Structures are given as C-alpha cells and as structure tokens.
Amino acid sequence: MAKYQVGQKVKYTAIGGGNVENSTTTGEIVEVITGPEPAGDSGVTVQASEEEPRYLIKNDNTGKSTAYKVDNIIGVIN
C-alpha cells in the first residue's frame, strides 16, 4: 500500500544527495508506480512493486520528474 498519494507536495532528498541540509528539495507526486516501468524524464526502468512503490515526483525548482523510493521522502508539506 502506498504511503503517499498523487497530488501531495513533499519534501525529499535527491538521489545521491546525502544527509546534508541543502540536499533536500520539494515537489509534487504525479504518479505512484507499483510495477516495473520506464519512469521520469530519463525513462529509466524502475523496479517498483505493490510492496515497494516508487513515487514519480515533479521537482518544484527544475520541473523535472524523477522516481524515488519512500526512503527519500521526508514528509508531506503544506
């Protein structure tokens, strides 16, 4: 079951961003992916499942969409 839903604004850490404060950013979840499929602007196939969904997030600053694991999402913002 997906923890987050389409349309939610979230704060998250970029892939490879580490744990430094300036590595966080915000965006909107545009799709919850629950199976293997090409995702985001890069078209890289993500290995998602019902148990481990990926969240396609459109970055507020760049407008680019990238799929993230739940571990990258810090939480929902208003």
Image (cartoon, rainbow, N blue to C red):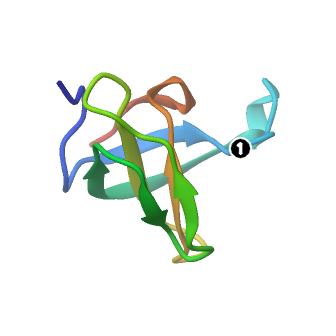
Task: Tell me where residue 36 appears, x and y as whole percent.
Answer: 41, 50
Rendering coords of residue 15 (x, y %): 71, 43
Residue closer to the observer: 45 or 75: 45
Quadrant in the rendering for residue 53: top left
**Residue 8 rendering spot, x and y as whole percentages:** 23, 48
Q: Name the residue: 19% across, 53% down.
A: 6
Residue 48 percent location from the top left of the image: 41, 40
Nearer-the-camera pick, 27 or 42: 42
77 vs 75: above or below: below
With 75 as the anchor, is 5 left or right in this view?
A: left
- The residue that label 1 is drawn on is 15
Which is nearer the eye, 34 or 58? Answer: 34
Identify the image quadrant of the N terminus. top left
Please tell me whether residue 25 is drawn above or below residue 63 in the rendered image.
above
Q: Quadrant of residue 52?
A: top left
Quarter holding residue 72 = top right
Q: How crowded is mark 1: few (under 14 residues within 10 Å), some or many (20 or more)?
A: few
At x 44%, y 28%, the residue is 70
77 sits left or right of 1 in the view: right
Q: Which residue is drawn at 82% across and 28% down?
A: 20
Amino acid type, residue under disc 1 in the picture: Ile
Q: In which quarter of the image is the C terminus?
A: top left
Q: Helix or strand or loop: what does disc 1 sit on?
A: loop
